[in-house]
Image: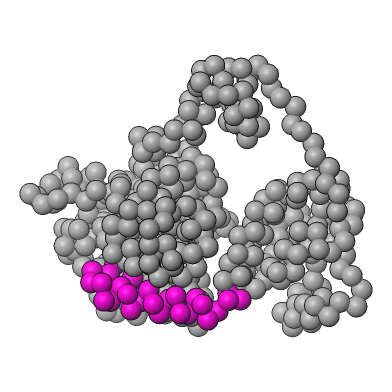
Amino acid sequence: MKRKWEICPPNLTLQETLSRELGISPLTAQVLANRGINQIDQAYQFLHPSLSHLHPPLLMKDMQKAVDRIIQALSKREQVLIYGDYDVDGVTSTAILILFFNSLQFPCRYYIPHRIERGYGLHGDIVEKFAHEGVSLIITADCGISDVDPVRRAQEMGVDVIVTDHHEISEEVPPAYSVINPKQGDCSFPFESLAGVGVVFNLIIALRAKLRERGAWGDGEVPNLRRYLDLVAMGTVADLVPLQGENRIFVRFGLEELTKGNRLGIRVLKESSGLKESVITTGSVGFRLAPRINAAGRLGEPQKGVELLLAQDRKTAEEIARELTDRYGSLPSEAYGLLDKTRLKIYASRLGLEAVFISESYCKLDFGRKIKYRLAPVSSVLKDIQGEKKILSLDPLSIILKPPAKSTAVEKITAALARMAEEPAVYLEGSSDSDREKLS
């Protein structure tokens, strides 16, 4: 397929201003401008990310309320449950919360649902189980924003729920004690594209500040939150959120922590991934470290990932890392699936679309509020986007790629979709020369 390149016309005035004020080349200045970075302070922070640029966590709606409730639980020695998700974002979020509570000598429990048997999110019967066992506060990690009924059930049983999540918000918000999600319409936090682990980290920042005022650690060492950034960076990169704003800062400094490998579990994971002495990059995280943590969740043992990140003795860490690496290696299709999903999100984003993954193998693509969701296999959509099938020019709203005739793969796909009571498989494609150019 021939590629037709269109060069964005330069904004010479802005280019000159950025170049002069920041001491950068005109080319770099124009690249920044092309990416919508057109303010001096905005460009400086992009080029020189600093932890001092992080926004105050208390700007997030319900943050103060959540901090106060957790401090109450600590002072009364209540039973607290961390309820996480089974992907890397959820596992790192869960681990960070446990590590922070451990620094306070406060034991807490955690639960991550089985990916196949349970699926994503809070479950009413699990909430009931822990309520009967004495849990009075549940803190979710990377889940909960759509779990209205389970949260209501917790409320009925006298269990408070603090939801920390970053996923899109449905029409009805769960009746939780506190809901921390920067995507809430009335949330004043300036950056809404955090991963789940970024939301949790902001909670920890706010909680540490309040506890330090109260002398919670006495003469002991107050936790250095910079040391948590290895896990924040891993969850952020793995969840494919945009590396801008807060995320860029987290990843910038988190990669340094990952490279140092001060955390035993991370150090052993790097060794098992062939990265012992390597400088860790986003690629190292996305395609070497994160898939091994994901392997645990995919095989129904997400707690293995948490156990590795919390490990205190080398033998235990090595056993878990070896097991995760073996399982990851035994599932090459799963590994390729992660790579496919990563690529698909990138390509769909270039078309201004959102790829929503409903399972490891299938996704649906959001074509706009007035257009129904279309369902198709990840691998097939990826091939279509990359130009392996002929792209037809159709109505810009439908953006449909017509598959070749007598395609066995398409027949199988259509049959699978029929069994799922969905409409026939529909594929993503560019609908114009301009759309095609965005794919190159």
**Residue that lies at the very extreme toward the front in this rendered image:** 277
Residue range corresponding to the magenta coloring: 307-334
Magenta-colored stretch includes residue 319 = yes
On screen, residue 381 versus residue 190, left or right, reads right
Query: What's the image's color scheme?
Result: one colour
**Magenta segment main secondary structure:** helix
The picture quadrant where one finds residue 31 is top right
Q: Residue at x 82, y 53 (%)?
A: 430
Note whether 188 is above or below 310 in the view shown: above
Q: Residue at x 52, y 29 (%)?
A: 43
- Percent across and percent down for residue 113 are 44, 76
- Percent across and percent down for residue 276 are 38, 62
**Residue that lies at the very extreme toward the right in this rendered image:** 405
Note whether 141 is above or below 328 in the view shown: above
- Percent across and percent down for residue 65 are 32, 49
Magenta-colored stretch includes residue 99 = no
Give whichever of 337, 149 is nearer the camera.
337
Q: Please indicate, yes or no, whether residue 82 appears anywhere in the rendered image.
A: no
On screen, residue 297 versus residue 131, left or right, reads right
Q: Please indicate, yes or no, whether residue 288 appears anywhere in the rendered image.
A: yes
- Percent across and percent down for residue 199 are 41, 51
Note whether 235 is above or below 351 in the view shown: below
Q: Residue at x 80, y 67 (%)?
A: 426
Q: Residue at x 87, y 61 (%)?
A: 390
On screen, residue 280 versus residue 375, left or right, reads left
Instruction: Count up the numbered dots.
Output: 0
